[in-house]
Amino acid sequence: MSTAVHYHEGAFPPAELNWARLVTLIGSANGAVARYDGLLSAIPNAAVLLSPLTTQEAVLSSRIEGTQATMGEVLEYEAKGDTGDLTSPKEADIWEVLNYRTAMRAAETMLQELPLSLRVVREAHKILLSGVRGQGKSPGEYRRIPNWIGPAGCTMEDARFIPIAADKLPEAMSRWERYIHEETPDRLIHLALLHAEFEALHPFLDGNGRLGRMLIPLFMHQAGLIHRPMFYISAFLEANRDAYYDRLLAVSRDGDWTGWCAFFLTAVQQQAEENHRKAAAILDLYNRMKTHFVDLTHSQYAIHALDWIFERPIFKSSDFVTASPIPKPTAGRILNVLKQEGVLKEIEKGSGRRAAVLAYAELLNLAEGRDAF
């Protein structure tokens, strides 16, 4: 007999929450987000300076779904130039991460002209599954068949959770979209409910978890909580994966929306604090290196070099020489100086016509939160 939890039909949005239990968490989470956003808004060209954090978020969100690629592997693969040929499981993992990052950027661009909506969701889903293992699973289209969540290869009878029936999905997604734009007492609670409902509906055949987490910074940006959709929550969710899934499951099983909201607010607060710490450390590194690059290179192009390397902390030496806005002879000299002074680390030596692959280890280690390079 099946013991699977079934979707909570008719229970979204919840009629009531235990606000007394949540009020302290709401204050702490909103305060932490505001402090992070204050720093984010002060960072010049945040998309460049925080580029490693954006890639790390894509890595960790994908890892929750079972991929094994690291940030270093993704950036090194990208630096060497991909072939588009997924010849190994590792390459397939890397492409899922790259697609995540591309889909996030595309969604951010769409939000400049559109509100967060089902159109944005479907377009992001197309990109997320483009050319990877889920490409045969109707990218951008809602599922038309039942699906279920449980151990790999399990039957519906052995499933842990069974989402809404496919024939009821379009109406449920329209209700979810309408709720995005409703007025609510608190935007983070609003977001918690939207995320839980999206995951419970499981509207696509693949990519629901990654897409649901991608929607978190997009909603925070649209709601005015952050100036840019650059909020990195997956580290907490990956470290607390079992609790993450259990709290989501309890929404449908027990109607425990409040418990889920409490978990989500804790995740937001802790990650806002960690995001602030990492972003501050990266900004401090950038400000220190502005002077250091000038002192080392004695070049008017020192800051151009710094910006280019921050955006691509693993790169081929030939790409720096040919693609950076620096005259080629000067670019080559700058690279030699930065290698000699230990600023750049050679992770693959050049040989013949093959360029060396270089890494800015200090920046990468800040993003990783440990000495990984």
Image (tube, rainbow, N blue to C red):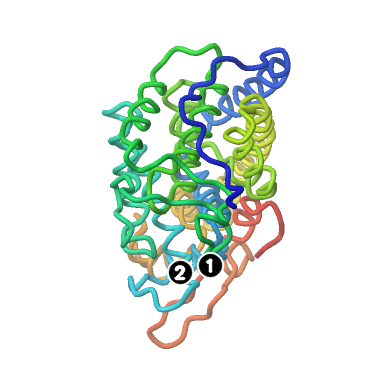
Circle 1 residue: 73
> What amino acid type should be assigned to the residue bearing mark 1?
Glu
Q: Foreground: 197 or 282?
A: 197
Tell me if mark 1 has few (under 14), some (14-19) or many (20+) residues whose alpha carbon lies within 10 angstroms of its own: some
Q: Residue at x 39, y 50 (%)?
A: 146
Seen from the viewer's position, the closer of residues 22 and 294 is 22
* Above or below 25: residue 52: below
User: SS class of the residue under badge 1?
Assistant: helix
Residue at horizontal 31%, vertical 34%?
118
Residue 203, how many percent across, how many down?
39, 43
Q: Is residue 44 left or right of residue 344?
A: left
Which amino acid, by three-letter code, is at mark 2? Tyr
Please give left or right for residue 222 compared with residue 135 in the image.
right
Instruction: Verify CB contact (< 8 Å) between mark 2 and mark 1.
Output: yes
Q: Which residue is mark 2?
A: 77
Query: In the structure shown, which secondary structural element does the residue marked by tag 2 occupy?
Result: helix
Whether residue 181 is situated above or below residue 176 in the rendered picture: above
